Amino acid sequence: MEAVKDYNVHIDSKKRVTLRGAKYQYYNVKEYDNGCIMLEPRELVVPAEISAKSLASMDQAIHNFKHGKTSDSIDLSDF
């Protein structure tokens, strides 16, 4: 595999490295004993559906609301 970019970097005082012209905002980092560091791009994706646990929690909240199990009202008149 041929390198697309080849440049030297240095670690700043906070132990950070800057990637020039990075194509992705997030990377997974793997550091090996021999000093090699592998960066794999990661893209954060919105999940296609709501999890079953979240749906169950929402159902429980609506059930509590319908049966009057709510917290005290908050007075927002000062705002």
Image (tube, helix red, strand yellow):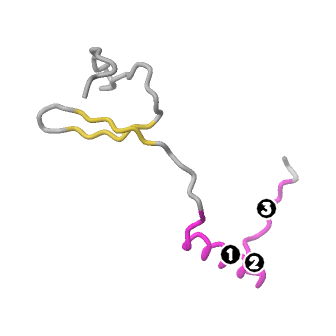
Q: Which residue is mark 3?
A: 74
User: What residue do we see at 58% from left, 59% from top?
Assistant: 48
Going by the image, does 54 lie left or right of 1?
right
User: What residue do we see at 40% from left, 19% from top?
Assistant: 20
Q: Earlier in the sequence, mark 3 or mark 1?
A: 1
Contact, mark 1 vs mark 2 (Cβ under 8 Å) = yes
- Does the stretch in magenta take in 9? no
The image shows residue 3, relative to residue 63, as above or below, that is above
The image shows residue 20, relative to residue 66, as above or below, that is above
Could you tell me the amino acid type at mark 2?
A: Phe
Binning the other alpha carbons within 10 Å of mark 3 as few (below 14), some (14 to 19) or many (20 upward) gives few
Q: How many marks?
A: 3
Report x, y in % for residue 13. Answer: 31, 20
Going by the image, does 29 lie left or right of 54?
left
User: What residue do we see at 24% from left, 33% from top?
Assistant: 37
Could you tell me the amino acid type at mark 1?
A: Ala
Binning the other alpha carbons within 10 Å of mark 2 as few (below 14), some (14 to 19) or many (20 upward) gives few
- Does the stretch in magenta take in 69? yes
Secondary structure type for disc 3: loop
Q: Which residue is mark 2?
A: 65
Contact, mark 3 vs mark 2 (Cβ under 8 Å) = no
Secondary structure type for disc 1: helix
Binning the other alpha carbons within 10 Å of mark 1 as few (below 14), some (14 to 19) or many (20 upward) gives some
Could you tell me the amino acid type at mark 3?
A: Ile
The residue mark sitting in front, 3 or 1, is 1
Going by the image, does 11 lie left or right of 27?
left
Q: Name the outermost residue toward the bottom.
A: 67
The image shows residue 63, relative to residue 38, as above or below, that is below
- Which residues are the magenta region? 49-76
Q: Which residue is mark 1?
A: 61
Secondary structure type for disc 2: helix
